[in-house]
Image (tube, rainbow, N blue to C red):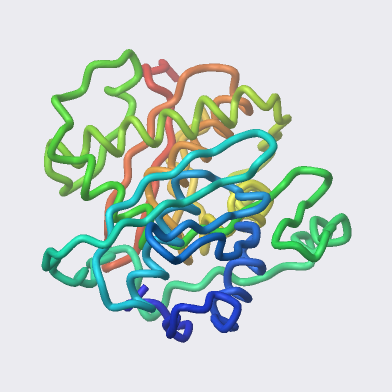
Amino acid sequence: MRLGNITKPSGLDPTAWTDYIFDWESRGLGRFRLLDDEQDIRILAEGPASGPICAGALAAAWECASSRRHRLTWSDGPTDGLIVSLIEQHTDVPSPKPLNVPWMTSESTISPSDENQIHWTDYRSDGGGTWSIMGERKMMVHLDLVLRFEEYCTPYVEGKNFTRSEDYVWDGSEDKRSAWWDAVADSAREGFVSEGHHVLVRDHSDWISIARRHLSSHGLGGLRETKQTDTHGGVLLTFSGVFHPAIASGILLGCWERAYGRNGRAVFSFKSDKPILELRSSRVIAD
């Protein structure tokens, strides 16, 4: 909360958190109100997009507003909504520190395109902190949330132990972080392939429009340029901006496999401070 660009909640009346309420509703998280503040603090979130994310966000807001640390519990029911209970804890907890994002540079941009505007023609909002595109509910999350989740998980990763782990290479990444990125990328690839998208590649330049459709429209990245590396679909993709390399790489590998009908391999690296992804067949194919 302290690292964000919105005004920090102040005071113990959530109805006065105008900036924070707008942030919640515009990101599709739902809406909230105070139920009880006499003994334990209880806050109700109506139509929460994600129980754990919304519970953590409300706890952070209350801690910022009260300047006190609280213990968090929550219950998420199908009819009652999300009830967040907070009990004051008399402990000192260090403030969060900014996280380094090596793939984000001053040149990182994801340019809007006319093609993406098609999605917004099917935008619907009920005015209560929930909105959808083409009938599917959407939620916006910050990269900072994903990175802190990654920092929390990485120490507990024991190694690469799934079938497709060898199909991902992260140049310069340490072993445990690399293993976590493998899992994230393959989850993104599996999720994409299971949706049954049709992907056609006529020329390596088609990857620009493919990225617009499957990355940019979801805020996950965009491509600056492409280069063919072999005659079997191998391509070198240079990002103009990317939300998270593992997520984007997994989705684009899913695109590659849908286009060519065989397993592929993703190699992510930095060259001249530019994020670059190479996609190619997982097995050597004779010319």
- Give the farthest residue toward the right: 121
Where's residue 204, x and y in %?
58, 45
- Give the farthest residue toward the front: 38
Residue 30 versus residue 273 in the image, above or below: above
Q: Quadrant of residue 70?
A: bottom left
Front residue of 50/58: it is 58
Where's residue 131, x and y in %?
75, 56
Front residue of 192/11: it is 11
**Quadrant (top left/top right/bottom left/bottom right) for the N terminus:** bottom left
**Quadrant (top left/top right/bottom left/bottom right) for the C terminus:** top left
Where's residue 211, x and y in %?
60, 51
Q: Is residue 231 left or right of residue 138?
A: left
Front residue of 202/139: it is 139
Front residue of 242/5: it is 5
Q: Is residue 182 left or right of residue 206?
A: left
Residue 222 is at least partly visible in this image: no
Count every numbered label the image shows and give the total: 0
Residue 74 is at least partly visible in this image: yes
Where's residue 164, x and y in %?
35, 19
Q: Is residue 117 left or right of residue 203?
A: right
Residue 179 versus residue 212 in the image, above or below: above
Q: Quadrant of residue 38?
A: bottom left
Q: Residue at 44% x, 44% y: name it.
A: 74
Q: Residue at 51% x, 44% y: name it.
A: 51
Q: Residue at 58% x, 51% y: name it.
A: 215
Residue 152 versus residue 77 in the image, above or below: below
Q: Residue at 34% x, 30% y: name it.
A: 183
